[in-house]
């Protein structure tokens, strides 16, 4: 066979090389039909409508037939995305393209691997008394949440109607769940049953709060509670047949990190990083404790009056520190959003975060950066429609949880705790706990640990015995990480990405680098994966990011 040699002029060759280097160009496997950003926005709008389950009589349909049809139809939306050529766009718009790709991959992963509607009883919890500190509630849940925290009781007529509309679908949804749930994963089933039992208790409390409300609402709450109790009993009756491990396996975990969470690491990389963070936190804690050994212990909040005084004072001191040190542009909404989450005094027993909080309320106000994020979403909605609301599948978490974790130690380094040296110890206790529970996440999904073993590991490797096995927090955290892979690792992985970004900007700007302008730029990027924030702000497509963004 004769082969013709094709000679390319240097300009054409350079263009081909540039196109091949673009992660967006590499992701396209069909001929591009558009290079218009407006077409991505239209696709995003259509995609979000499609992603929601079909409603039958007001009840979301998660039946096997409905889910198979949705998965088959997903391919059409993915083809539409691949047909949009974003390679010539600005970095922020290319990042939007990857956000949409990650969301579509999230639904694909749900269908191929997680299948929460078929495996996870907790998926069918739809009543939530407390507000999440995240842009959207952590973990996978059925459509139709009743966010009780968002209402003022006694309910106004319009609010009562809205609550009733959500509550009255519960019996039909749980009846459908008995057919949908065919999984055999032991830990997911067992902890999911407890989540359903908690919903029954929450509905019991709701019944008391609406006792003087409309008769229809009271009746629907009663029916929902009875249906939830019956469903929990049914789950218990099936528990003996659930014997399979609940982890997704390393290969699936790697795919999820790269294609949904947009994390530039593998499962094995993350194990090494978490082990290093665990060792670092213990080492730094030891030196802090040595330096502070002659100082008295931190006084623990011991009364409602002291709680109000110290927690209110902590917010005031923290906001003053941010302003005086010119660390970020303080907006009017920040103080009220942060102050509104103080809560009330709890006499005990104390869970892990209360052990920290009651010793120095300023420490976890730094992690309360979440409330700055939520305040920004409410008061300064992003101009970009793709970034305006919460991203699906918790893919915001390396930015939200990760940066809030990074901010704790950044504020330590900025001098926030110079006047309270023993408070510095608490920062490293927090890092250790995040690393220990992250290793539980990773080893549950590799099926090296059961949930109980992961909980025991996290408790044993958290300093000062503050993460107690005889309390609920440690298991509820591991249960979340089992349902939502990579959530347990996002705190320290996002922290690492934030530190990389600061380093990249400082190297590039040198003496011109300043924290407040950096933070203004950082916050303006919105709540997208930390890797995309890093790419957008630095403008550098580093090797790790390039590899992550390639198909």
Image: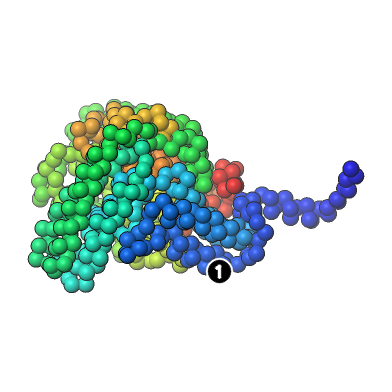
Q: Residue at x 63, y 58 (%)?
A: 87
Q: Position of residue 417 (x, y in %)?
A: 29, 43
Q: Position of residue 455 (x, y in %)?
A: 30, 32
Q: Residue at x 21, y 51 (%)?
A: 228
Q: In the displayed structure, does residue 163 sit left or right of residue 27? A: left
Please tell me which residue lies in front, 505 or 215: 215
Q: In the displayed structure, does residue 462 sit left or right of residue 70? A: left
Would you say residue 390 is visible in this rendering? yes
Q: In the displayed structure, does residue 197 sit left or right of residue 536? A: left
Q: Quadrant of the N terminus?
A: top right
Q: Position of residue 18 (x, y in %)?
A: 70, 52
Q: How is the image coloured?
A: rainbow
Is label 1 in a helix, a strand or a loop? Answer: helix
Q: How packed is label 1: few (under 14 Cα within 10 Å), some, or many (20 or more)?
A: few
Q: Residue at x 40, y 28 (%)?
A: 448
Would you say residue 322 is visible in this rendering? no
Q: Residue furthest right?
A: 2
Task: Tell me where residue 469 sits by quadrant.
Answer: top left
Please tell me which residue lies in front, 133 or 168: 168
Q: Residue at x 55, y 64 (%)?
A: 40
Q: Which residue is mark 1?
A: 38
Q: How many marks?
A: 1
Q: Position of residue 84 (x, y in %)?
A: 61, 61
């Amino acid at each position: 066979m004769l082969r013709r040699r094709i000679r390319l002029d240097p300009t054409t060759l350079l263009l081909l090389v540039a196109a091949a280097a673009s992660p967006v160009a590499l992701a396209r496997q069909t001929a591009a039909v558009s290079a218009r950003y407006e077409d991505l926005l239209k696709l995003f709008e259509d995609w979000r409508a499609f992603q929601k389950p079909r409603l039958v009589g007001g009840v979301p349909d998660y039946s096997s037939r409905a889910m198979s049809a949705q998965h088959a139809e997903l391919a059409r939306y993915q083809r539409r995305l691949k047909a949009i050529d974003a390679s010539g766009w600005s970095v922020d718009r290319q990042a939007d393209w990857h956000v949409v790709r990650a969301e579509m991959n999230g639904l694909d992963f749900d269908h191929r691997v997680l299948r929460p509607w078929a495996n996870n009883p907790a998926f069918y919890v739809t009543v939530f008394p407390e507000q999440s500190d995240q842009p959207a509630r952590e973990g996978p849940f059925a459509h139709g949440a009743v966010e009780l925290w968002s209402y003022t009781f006694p309910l106004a007529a319009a609010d009562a109607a809205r609550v009733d509309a959500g509550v009255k679908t519960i019996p039909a949804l749980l009846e459908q769940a008995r057919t949908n749930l065919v999984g055999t994963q032991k830990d997911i089933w067992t902890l999911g049953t407890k989540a359903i039992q908690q919903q029954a208790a929450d509905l019991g409390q709701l019944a008391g709060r609406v006792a003087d409300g409309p008769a229809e609402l009271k009746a629907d709450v009663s029916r929902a509670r009875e249906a939830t109790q019956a469903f929990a009993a049914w789950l218990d009756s099936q528990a003996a047949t659930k014997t399979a491990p609940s982890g997704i396996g390393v290969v699936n975990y790697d795919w999820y990190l790269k294609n949904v969470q947009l994390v530039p690491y593998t499962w094995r990389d993350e194990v090494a990083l978490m082990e290093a963070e665990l060792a670092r936190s213990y080492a730094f804690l030891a030196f802090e404790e040595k330096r502070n050994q002659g100082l008295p212990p931190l006084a623990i909040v011991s009364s409602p009056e002291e709680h109000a005084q110290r927690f209110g004072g902590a917010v005031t001191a923290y906001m003053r520190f941010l302003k005086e040190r010119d660390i970020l542009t303080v907006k009017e909404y920040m103080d009220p959003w942060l102050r509104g989450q103080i809560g009330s005094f709890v006499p005990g027993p104390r869970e892990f975060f209360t052990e920290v909080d009651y010793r120095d309320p300023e420490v976890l106000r730094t992690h309360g950066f979440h409330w700055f994020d939520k305040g920004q979403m409410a008061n300064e909605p992003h101009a970009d429609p793709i970034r305006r609301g919460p991203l699906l599948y918790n893919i915001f978490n390396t930015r939200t949880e990760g940066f809030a974790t990074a901010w704790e130690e950044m504020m330590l380094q900025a001098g926030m705790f110079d006047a309270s040296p023993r408070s510095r110890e608490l920062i490293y206790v927090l890092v250790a706990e995040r690393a220990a529970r992250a290793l539980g996440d990773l080893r549950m999904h590799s099926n090296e640990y059961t949930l109980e073993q992961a909980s025991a590991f996290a408790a044993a490797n958290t300093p000062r015995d503050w993460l107690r096995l005889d309390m609920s927090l440690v298991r509820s955290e591991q249960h979340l990480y089992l349902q939502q892979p990579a959530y347990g690792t996002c705190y320290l992985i996002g922290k690492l990405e934030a530190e990389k970004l600061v380093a990249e900007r400082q190297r590039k700007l040198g003496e011109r680098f300043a924290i407040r302008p950096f933070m203004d730029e950082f916050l303006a990027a919105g709540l997208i994966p930390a890797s995309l924030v890093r790419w957008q702000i630095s403008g550098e497509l580093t090797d790790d990011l390039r590899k992550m963004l390639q198909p």
